[in-house]
Every structure is written in structure tokens, then in C-alpha cells.
């Protein structure tokens, strides 16, 4: 092979020209592949989560049977309901020594409380003593009669009157919705019953010309009332288990009109978990003897007093019970 033939058979090496367009095309190709992998992975994870979730929603039993409730617009938080920080002036007592001291009473300087774990405690000279372990509904009493709310076999809440002398029990009111706090009036002529989930307090007359009658003491409250206790001014202290913000958004009002959402929530979450999502806005209101608002104490973020269930007045202080907190709060009324 001569030199000319060899040159003809050789293929000249052409230089590879790298341009921005080529680089962009390769990058785009790699990016497209990554996006496909991400989408496939995401869809796989989503399907693996959604299918069991729908299965749980359909197959699991709901521990509650919520009914639709339509509320009026909550009262605006102005005047005696004006937000403040007065509950933050309270001090915590016996922190981490008890669990959920929901209701509080006193005999002289000795305090008594029932706790979330079913104990009846006596607090004397700064020491806590366990008296009993039991469970019962909210009650109030006169010298001879005890008034108590009870859930019957049909899961209907009723107000009972028990005569400690004759040992007789009477049904005074039926069909109550989450009846909670019960309080006898100072003159013992009527009993107040808080219907927590209805944001109202009903009244039943147990003596006098109105005996046997009932009416609405206060309705459309700024929160969901828990326990009711007497105030030294002749009115009543009412603790709110949750607030109905106005202005603002009330999640509780929203869910009350949509029971199907409630069913889904309680199928997937237990009560303890659900409570964690309830805003920690603490509110105590004082009502007059006719049910009008006198004043209110707030802790907007529940920084000091949380999950308040009761406000019990004793010696110029409010002792604040809680259905969940591991302490009792005490507020000096002279400071507010």
C-alpha cells in the first residue's frame, strides 16, 4: 500500500464541539429522569398511605355518634369579655403532684379535689392525702338534697335529685347534651346545669312558685362551659373548656356543623390526641345572678393556666381546676 492509498483509508478525527445547547440537553435528560423517579416514588408512597387510610375510615367503628349542631355567631369579645392576661397572674400549686384536678371544694382551710385518675384528694397544710378512688358525675347539694347528672342506658344525660333522708331519686331533666357543671343557687330555689357542647347553661326550679319549671339561664356563650361555682358577689364563676373566638375562627363551631369530619377524626385519633389540637385559650367568666356577664379573666395562650375546668372561690382567691393539667392554679382576686 502506497502512501496515497493509506491516506485515503484513514478517517480523519473530527474534533467534538461542546456547545451550551448540548450541555443543556444532557442536563434536561438527566433532570427528566430524576423527575420521573420522584413522581413514581411519591405516587407509590401516597397510594400505600391512602389505601390503608380509606380502609380505616370505612371499616373502623367510631366511638362517638356526633349529631349536627348549628350555633349562632359567638358573642364578640368586648366589654366584660374583652381579652386580657389576668389569668397569667395565677400561681401554680402542687405541680406534678396530681393529675387533672377537675373540681375543687373546701371545708374551712382544707381543700378537696377529684382527679382525672379517679382519686379523691384532701389537701391540708400543703400536703396531699388520698381519701378514695372512684368515679361519678358532676354534683351539687343542699343540706338534704343532692343534684347530679347521670348518663342512662340510652346514653342520654339526665339531672337527678337524691333525697338523703328518704333515699328517693327523682329525674328532674332529661335529654341533656353533655351535661357537665351543676350548681345550686344561693337561695336553693333552682339548679344550673351547663350543657358543654351546646355552649349554654339551663336552669331548673326546685322550689318556690316556679318549682318544676325550667328555662335558659344563658345561651350562645363565648366558650363551652364546664363547671359552675358560686361567686362571693352572688353570681357564678364559669370555666370554659374551649373558647369560641369572635373575632376569629372557631374550629369547634366549624366541626359541630360537620359530624362526618368528627367521625373521621375520632376513628383515627383517640381523645387524648384530639385534645392536643384544641387551642390552649383559657377563659373564666363571672355571671350575675341573672346570667349577664360581669367580668372575665383570660390567658390567650394558656401559658400559666391551661385546660381550666373550674373556678372555685375561697378566701379572696380563685382556685382553678383542670381536667388535664398536673397542678392547681390560684389567682388572687385583689390583683385583678
Image: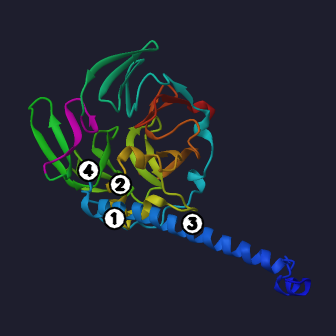
Residue on which disc 2 sits: 268
Crowd class of label 2 (few under 14; some 14 to 19; many from 20; radius 10 Å): some
Q: Quadrant of the N terminus?
A: bottom right
Can you tell which quarter of the image residue 26 is in? Answer: bottom right
Cα distance between the residues tagged 4 and 3: 64 Å
Colour treatment of the image: rainbow
Q: Which residue does the numbered mark 4 point to in the structure image? A: 204
* Mark toward the viewer: 1 or 2: 1
Single out the mark in the foreground, 4 or 1. Answer: 1
Q: Which residue is mark 1?
A: 54
Residue occupying image coordinates x 51% and y 30%: 329
Task: Say whether disc 1 or disc 2 marks the residue closer to the N-terminus.
Answer: 1
The alpha-carbon separation of the residues under discs 1 and 2 comes to 11 Å
Q: CA distance from mark 3 to mark 2?
A: 29 Å
Which region shows up in magenta? 136-153
Pinpoint residue 77: horizontal percent, then vertical percent. Answer: 57, 57
Between discs 1 and 3, the one toward the N terminus: 3
Amino acid at each position: 500500500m502506497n502512501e496515497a492509498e493509506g491516506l485515503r483509508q484513514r478517517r480523519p478525527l473530527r474534533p467534538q464541539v461542546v456547545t451550551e445547547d448540548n450541555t443543556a440537553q444532557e442536563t434536561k435528560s438527566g433532570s427528566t429522569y430524576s423527575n420521573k423517579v420522584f413522581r413514581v416514588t411519591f405516587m407509590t408512597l401516597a397510594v400505600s398511605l391512602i389505601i390503608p387510610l380509606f380502609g380505616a375510615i370505612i371499616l373502623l367503628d367510631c366511638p362517638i355518634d356526633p349529631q349536627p349542631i348549628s350555633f349562632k355567631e359567638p358573642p364578640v369579645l368586648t366589654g366584660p369579655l374583652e381579652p386580657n392576661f389576668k389569668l397569667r397572674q395565677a400561681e401554680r400549686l402542687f405541680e406534678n403532684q396530681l393529675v387533672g384536678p377537675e373540681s375543687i371544694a373546701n371545708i374551712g382551710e382544707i381543700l378537696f379535689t377529684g382527679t382525672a385518675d379517679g382519686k379523691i384528694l384532701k389537701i391540708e397544710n400543703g400536703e396531699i392525702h388520698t381519701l378514695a378512688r372512684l368515679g361519678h358525675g358532676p354534683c351539687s347539694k343542699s343540706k338534704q338534697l343532692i343534684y347530679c347528672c347521670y348518663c342512662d342506658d340510652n346514653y342520654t344525660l339526665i339531672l337527678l335529685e337524691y333525697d338523703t333522708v328518704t333515699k328517693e331519686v327523682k329525674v328532674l331533666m332529661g335529654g341533656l347534651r353533655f351535661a357537665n357543671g351543676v350548681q345550686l343557687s344561693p337561695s336553693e330555689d333552682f339548679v344550673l346545669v351547663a350543657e358543654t357542647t351546646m355552649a349554654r347553661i339551663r336552669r331548673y326550679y326546685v322550689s318556690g312558685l316556679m318549682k318544676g319549671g325550667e328555662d335558659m339561664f344563658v345561651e350562645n356563650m363565648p366558650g363551652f362551659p364546664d363547671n359552675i361555682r358560686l361567686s362571693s358577689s352572688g353570681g357564678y364563676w364559669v370555666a370554659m373548656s374551649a373558647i369560641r373566638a369572635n373575632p376569629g375562627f372557631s374550629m369547634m363551631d366549624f366541626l359541630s356543623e360537620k359530624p362526618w369530619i368528627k367521625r373521621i377524626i375520632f376513628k383515627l385519633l383517640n381523645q387524648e390526641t384530639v385534645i392536643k389540637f384544641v387551642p390552649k385559650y383559657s377563659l373564666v367568666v363571672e355571671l350575675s345572678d341573672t346570667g349577664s356577664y360581669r367580668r372575665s379573666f383570660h390567658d390567650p395562650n394558656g401559658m400559666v393556666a391551661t385546660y381550666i375546668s373550674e373556678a372555685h372561690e375561697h378566701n379572696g382567691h380563685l382556685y382553678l381546676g383542670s381536667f388535664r393539667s398536673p397542678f392547681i392554679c390560684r389567682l388572687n382576686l385583689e390583683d385583678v
